[in-house]
C-alpha cells in the first residue's frame, strides 16, 4: 500500500465550495473526502478543485499531436498538466491518411507507456470530413468527403482509445459515417456550413456534440437558427466553448454557460505556440503568427486555435464573463469528463476517483497539481 497523502482547505465537493475539507489519496486514487477541523493535513494555499479535462487541445510548449513524435506528445501532456489539465483528448487536424495514422500510433504508444502529466483519455479527430467553407485554420487540401473505410483504418491505429470525430453533417458520406460508427465514436458537429435542418438531421443520425460552438459554423438568426440554434435547442447535446475572450464575446460565453450549465465544456483548442513567445509557428501545412495574445494564419489572419490554458479559461469565465466560480468549475471538470467517457473516475473529488487535484490560487493559477496522485513539478 502506498503512502496516504492529505491536502486540506476550501474544496469543490458535490457542486459547492466547502471549508475545511481534507482530501486523502493513495495509489493514484482518492481514498477519502471529509470535513475535518483545521490543522490535520497540508494546508492547500488556495481552493481545491478536481483536475481539468480538456476535450479539444492540439498542443503547447512548442509541440503538437500532429508531430507524431512520442517526445513531443509527452511535452504537451506535461505542459498542460502544469496549468491544471489532468486529462485530455489528443486532438488532430485535417491531414493525409498516413499523417493521421502516424499521429494516432504515436498517441497510442505514449498512452501505453503511462507517462506523467495529463492522461490521454482518447483522440479527437478534428476533420478531415468537414466543410471547406468553414475550414478555419484547417488545411483545405486535406479536407475531403467522409470515408468510412479510411476512418476504420485510422481507428485501427489506436484500438483501445476513445474517439471524438468532428465532422460537417452536410458533406458527402456524413450520414453513412455517423450511422456506421456511432457506437464506437462520439460524433461532433463542427467546421460546418449546415443550416438548422441539416444540423438537426446530424443529431438524429447520432451526433451528440458541437465543436467550438459559434466558431466555424453558421450562427443563429431568428428565422434560420443555424448550427448554433440546433445546439442550443437540443435537449442533451454537449457543446465546447473557447473561453479566451477572443473567439467568443464574453457576453456570449456568459449566455451559453447560463443556458447550458450541464452541457457546456470549456476547451482550450490550444496549439503548439501556447506557452511560447510571440513569433512564427507551424500548424500542420500552414504558418501561423503569434502576437497580441492570438494565433492567426499568416496569410489570411484567420484565428488558428488559441494560446489558452484551462486555468486561464476558468479565470476568463469568472473575470470576463462574470460567472460565479461554482458554475464554472463543472464546465472544466465534470461536463468534459462525461464527454470524454471518464465521468466514473474523473471530474469530481470523490472517493474512488482518480487523484486528479488542482489547487487554484486567488489569481486562478494552478498553484499545485496532482495527476493520478503524482505532484506535477512546475
Ligand atoms: Zn481545434
Image (cartoon, rainbow, N blue to C red):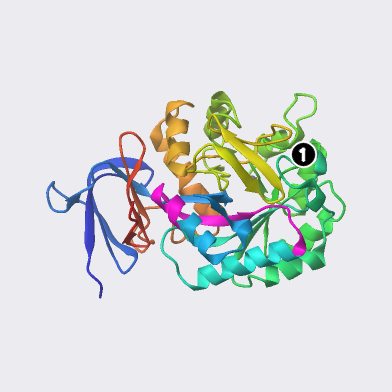
Does the magenta segment cover residue 14?
A: no
Q: Quadrant of the N terminus?
A: bottom left
Which one is nearer the viewer's eye here, 64 or 184? Answer: 64
> Is ligand 1 closer than 8 angstroms to the Cβ of mark 1?
no
Query: Which residue ends up furthest to the right in the rendered image?
Result: 172
Residue 315: x %, y % from top left: 42, 34
Q: Quadrant of residue 25?
A: bottom left
Q: Position of residue 12 (x, y in %)?
A: 34, 44
From the viewer's perspective, is 90 left or right of 300?
left
* Residue occupying the far front of the picture: 279
Q: Is residue 90 magenta?
A: yes
Of all residues, the one furthest to the bottom in this rendering is: 1
In the image, is 217 to the left or to the right of 7?
right
* Residue 73 on image: x %, y %: 53, 60
Instruction: Classify mark 1: residues with Cα within 10 Å, few (<14), some (14-19) or many (20+).
Output: some
Residue bearing mark 1: 134
Residue at 58% in and 69% down: 108
Does residue 104 sit above or below 142 in this rendering? below
Q: Is residue 242 visible?
A: yes
Q: Secondary structure at mark 1?
A: helix
Extent of the magenta region: 78-97
Of residue 25 and residue 280, the one placed in the foreground of this image is 280
- Residue 237 visible, this angle: no
Choose top left, top right, bottom left or bottom right for residue 180: bottom right
Corner quadrant of residue 367: top left
Counting from the top left corner in percent of width and height, residue 274 is at: 52, 43
- Of residue 141 and residue 354, the one placed in the foreground of this image is 141
Identify the residue at horizontal 59%, vertical 51% (top origin): 58
**In the image, 257: left or right of 133?**
left
Q: How many marks?
A: 1
- Locate residue 116 relative to residue 373 in the image: left or right: right
Amino acid at each position: 500500500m502506498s503512502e496516504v497523502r492529505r491536502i486540506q482547505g476550501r474544496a469543490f465537493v458535490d457542486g459547492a465550495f466547502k471549508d475545511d475539507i481534507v482530501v486523502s489519496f493513495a495509489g493514484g486514487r482518492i481514498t477519502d473526502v471529509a470535513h475535518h477541523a483545521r490543522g490535520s493535513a497540508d494546508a492547500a494555499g488556495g481552493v481545491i478543485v478536481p483536475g481539468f479535462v480538456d476535450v479539444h487541445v492540439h498542443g503547447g510548449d512548442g509541440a503538437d499531436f500532429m508531430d507524431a513524435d512520442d517526445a513531443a506528445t509527452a511535452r504537451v501532456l506535461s505542459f498542460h498538466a502544469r496549468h491544471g489539465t489532468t486529462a485530455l483528448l489528443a486532438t488532430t487536424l485535417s491531414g493525409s491518411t498516413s499523417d493521421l495514422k502516424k499521429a494516432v500510433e504515436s498517441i497510442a504508444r505514449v498512452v501505453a507507456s503511462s507517462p506523467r502529466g495529463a492522461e490521454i483519455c482518447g483522440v479527437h479527430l478534428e476533420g478531415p470530413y468537414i466543410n471547406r467553407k468553414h475550414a478555419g485554420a484547417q488545411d483545405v487540401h486535406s479536407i475531403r468527403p467522409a470515408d468510412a473505410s479510411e476512418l476504420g483504418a485510422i481507428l485501427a491505429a489506436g484500438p483501445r482509445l476513445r474517439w471524438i470525430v468532428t465532422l460537417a453533417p452536410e458533406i458527402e458520406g456524413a450520414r453513412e459515417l455517423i450511422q456506421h460508427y456511432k457506437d464506437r465514436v462520439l460524433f461532433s458537429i463542427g467546421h460546418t456550413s449546415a443550416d438548422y435542418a441539416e444540423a438537426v438531421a446530424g443529431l438524429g443520425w447520432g451526433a451528440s456534440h458541437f465543436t467550438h460552438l459559434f466558431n466555424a459554423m453558421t450562427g443563429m438568426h431568428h428565422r434560420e437558427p443555424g448550427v448554433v440554434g440546433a445546439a442550443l435547442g437540443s435537449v442533451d447535446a454537449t457543446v465546447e466553448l473557447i473561453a479566451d475572450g477572443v473567439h467568443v464575446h464574453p457576453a456570449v460565453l456568459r449566455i451559453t454557460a447560463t443556458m447550458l450549465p450541464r452541457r457546456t465544456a470549456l476547451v482550450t483548442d490550444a496549439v503548439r505556440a501556447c506557452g511560447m513567445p510571440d513569433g512564427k509557428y507551424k500548424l500542420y501545412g500552414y504558418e501561423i503568427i503569434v502576437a497580441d495574445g492570438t494565433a492567426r494564419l499568416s496569410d489570411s489572419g484567420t484565428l488558428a486555435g488559441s494560446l489558452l490554458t484551462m486555468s486561464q479559461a476558468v479565470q476568463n469565465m469568472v473575470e470576463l464573463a462574470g460567472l460565479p466560480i461554482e458554475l464554472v468549475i463543472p464546465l472544466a471538470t465534470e461536463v468534459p469528463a462525461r464527454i470524454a467517457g471518464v465521468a466514473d473516475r474523473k471530474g469530481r473529488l470523490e472517493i474512488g476517483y482518480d487523484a486528479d487535484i488542482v489547487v487554484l490560487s486567488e489569481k486562478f493559477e494552478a498553484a499545485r497539481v496532482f495527476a493520478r496522485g503524482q505532484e506535477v513539478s512546475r
